[in-house]
Amino acid sequence: MDHIEVEVKYHLADAARIREQLILAGAQSSGRWFEENIRFDTPDAHFRKKQMLIRLRRDRDNRLTLKLPHTATHTAGCKAYRELEVVVSDFSTVRTMLAHMGFSEYQVYEKWRETLQVGTTLFCIDELPFGLFLEIEGDPDTIRQWTDRLGLDWQCRITASYLSIFETLRTEKSLPFNQITFENFQSTSYRFADIYRHFLAESVP
């Protein structure tokens, strides 16, 4: 699969309310799954420097993904990037192959995700170790319409990735770990709400 993803995120105080609204609007859920993600890079951090991402994910499937900056990085106030993704049959074997190809495991991040869909628009209710979020993926006009329909504030949208959110939280709060796991966050009370304003200021117009 090779496509351009356009999306925004919202920090949620009440995920159940948003989910109920989506179901009432006819959204179909594909279930809630635990994700284990491994982020790979070269020893010289080539992919991070180029704002690219190589990720091996395990949930109900195993998928290898390459994310690339898109020419129109921001589209009508949304975040856009190119995503190339393949389903792989054996998570452990691909992990070993990447290691032999010279890639190192830079970061692990965990997440619970429920994906719902209305037409061609995807809604992901994400529980990360540092907070609850809604990710809306589709065309920019439809994303804006659903923002209004769900009673969300467009000015409060987030265009940063979860990884960059964590990096800001880690730096500002001097977190002693780089792995985004639920176990690690049991040792700290810091969450996204502690740095929320920083990302509102960085949202694109």
Image (cartoon, rainbow, N blue to C red):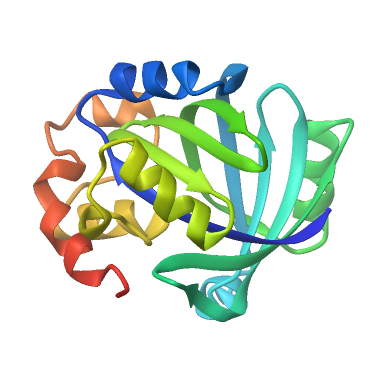
Residue 160 screen position, x and y as percent: 37, 61
Asked which quadrant contains residue 96, the reply is top right
Q: Is residue 127 left or right of residue 67?
A: left
Q: Nearer the viewer, residue 146 or 45?
A: 146
Q: Residue at x 24, y 70 (%)?
A: 202
Q: Residue at x 20, y 29 (%)?
A: 13
Relative vertical location of residue 52 with respect to residue 50 in this rendering, above or below:
above
Q: Residue at x 76, y 40 (%)?
A: 63
Q: Report whether residue 194 is seen.
A: yes
Residue 1 screen position, x and y as percent: 84, 53
Q: Report whether residue 173 is seen.
A: no
Residue extending furthest toward the bottom: 71
Residue 106 screen position, x and y as percent: 53, 55
Residue extending furthest toward the right: 89
Q: Residue at x 51, y 42 (%)?
A: 108
Relative vertical location of residue 28 with respect to residue 191 in this rendering, above or below:
above
Q: Is residue 21 left or right of residue 26?
A: left
Q: Is residue 143 left or right of residue 67?
A: left
Q: Nearer the viewer, residue 131 or 39?
A: 131
Asked which quadrant contains residue 56, the reply is top right
Asked which quadrant contains residue 121, the reply is top right
